[in-house]
């Protein structure tokens, strides 16, 4: 197995490969072919140090629909929890399963797994990146609006893992990204440098004006819950509500990776607004993650 075939970040793959994954996601969704079983006899180890609904259900259902099997591991219940090094765990899992899927706060733990693994490693979210979510978001945009290339996306709120992943996506799919964050909560400069199609402001209206897609995420991500009260005050001008969304293009759509906090980063009824496409976006986690598994685990 070529060790380069990990999926740790959207920058690990060429724009052509990413477009191929999305094209397959569209096809797999349309065909809903219950007899297509390219992963018979293949096993995924899904290591979840953090809570998950969508990512876990999409990977487990996706593996099973493609003919494979998933073992869900709480790392604390494995020998990792008793101090076995990640390096050793990566080598052991490489002997027994076909893909390692990891969610943990520490991106460097995922990177270490990838370095010592002989099988593909997928980043199922760290506090830095959430590349799997972006596959579903791009698929959803394309379904509703056509190619995202050249379009304008507004990301409002915290410069978190979703924001960093949107910066990478803007580079790979060549769309314009306008980020509005409170001062002090900007995305890491390592993600911003060199990418000319992303702009940063602290003005939510400026970022939203003329956007084709408006995106937000929670104000306190996993690992930052203890800052929630302070963040609610600082982030309140960045709430996406109906009137802020009115500043975007007339036919703009709204996405949120979920889970959402009504009354915080979104107004109470925003998910019921006709411009919100969050349920379709959540559903596309399944199709895009199936396409990713197929891309990483089959020759085709
Ligand atoms: N959007 C997302 O990754 O959801 P989960 O945390 O439920 O997996
Ligand atoms: N930014 C959120 C995404 C959850 C899917 C978090 O890290 O908690």
Image (spheres, rainbow, N blue to C red):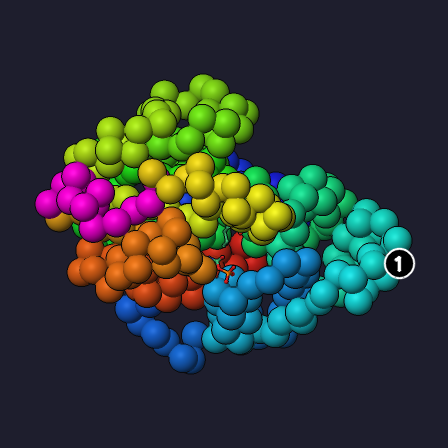
Which residue occupies 38% across, 63% down?
282
Was residue 247 drawn as part of the magenta stretch in this picture? yes
Residue 23 locus on image (x, y percent): 33, 54
In the displayed orientation, state which residue is furthest to the left.
250
Residue 72 locus on image (x, y percent): 66, 69
Task: Report the magenta stretch's main SS.
Answer: loop
Which residue occupies 25% across, 44% down?
213
Nearer to us in this view, 72 or 43:
72
- Side of 123 where 278 appears, left or right: left
The secondary structure type at the circle numbered 1 is helix
Question: Is residue 152 something that shows in the picture?
Answer: no
Residue 87 locus on image (x, y percent): 81, 47
In the displayed orientation, state which residue is furthest to the bottom.
35
Residue 110 locus on image (x, y percent): 67, 46
Q: Which residue is mark 1?
A: 82
Residue 143 position (above or below residue 250): below
- Side of 107 where 95 appears, left or right: right
- Side of 281 where 117 appears, left or right: right
Was residue 295 drawn as part of the magenta stretch in this picture? no
Question: Is residue 90 something that shows in the picture?
Answer: yes
Q: Which residues are magenta?
A: 238-250
Query: For the residue carrying disc 1, how many other residues have a C-alpha within 10 Å: few (<14), some (14-19), or many (20+)?
Result: few
Nearer to us in this view, 188 or 175:
188
Nearer to us in this view, 35 or 226:
226
Which residue occupies 35% across, 25% down?
201
């Amino acid at each position: 197995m070529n060790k380069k075939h990990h999926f740790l970040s959207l920058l690990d793959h060429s724009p052509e490969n990413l477009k191929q994954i999305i094209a397959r996601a569209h096809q797999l969704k349309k065909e809903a072919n219950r007899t297509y079983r390219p992963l018979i006899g293949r096993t995924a180890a899904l290591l979840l140090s953090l809570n998950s609904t969508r990512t876990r259900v999409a990977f487990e259902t996706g593996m099973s629909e493609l003919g494979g099997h998933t073992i869900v591991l709480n790392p604390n219940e494995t020998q990792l929890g008793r101090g076995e090094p990640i390096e050793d765990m990566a080598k052991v899992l490489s002997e027994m399963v076909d893909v390692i899927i990891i969610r943990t706060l520490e991106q460097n733990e995922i990177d270490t797994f990838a370095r010592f693994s002989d099988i593909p490693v997928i980043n199922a979210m760290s506090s830095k990146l959430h590349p799997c979510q972006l596959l579903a978001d791009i698929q959803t945009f394309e379904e509703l609006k056509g190619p995202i290339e050249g379009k304008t996306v507004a990301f409002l709120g915290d410069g978190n893992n979703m924001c960093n992943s949107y910066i990478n996506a803007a580079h790979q799919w060549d769309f314009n990204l306008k980020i509005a964050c409170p001062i002090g909560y900007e995305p890491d400069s390592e993600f911003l440098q060199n990418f000319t199609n992303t702009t940063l402001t602290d003005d939510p209206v400026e970022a939203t004006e003329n956007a084709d897609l408006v995106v937000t995420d929670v104000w306190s991500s996993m690992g930052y819950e203890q800052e929630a009260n302070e963040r609610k005050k600082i982030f309140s001008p960045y709430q996406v509500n109906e009137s802020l969304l009115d500043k975007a293009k007339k036919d703009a759509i709204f996405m949120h990776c979920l889970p959402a906090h009504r009354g915080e980063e979104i107004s109470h009824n925003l998910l019921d607004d006709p411009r919100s496409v969050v349920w379709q976006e959540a559903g596309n986690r399944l199709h895009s993650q199936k396409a990713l598994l197929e891309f990483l685990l089959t020759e085709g």
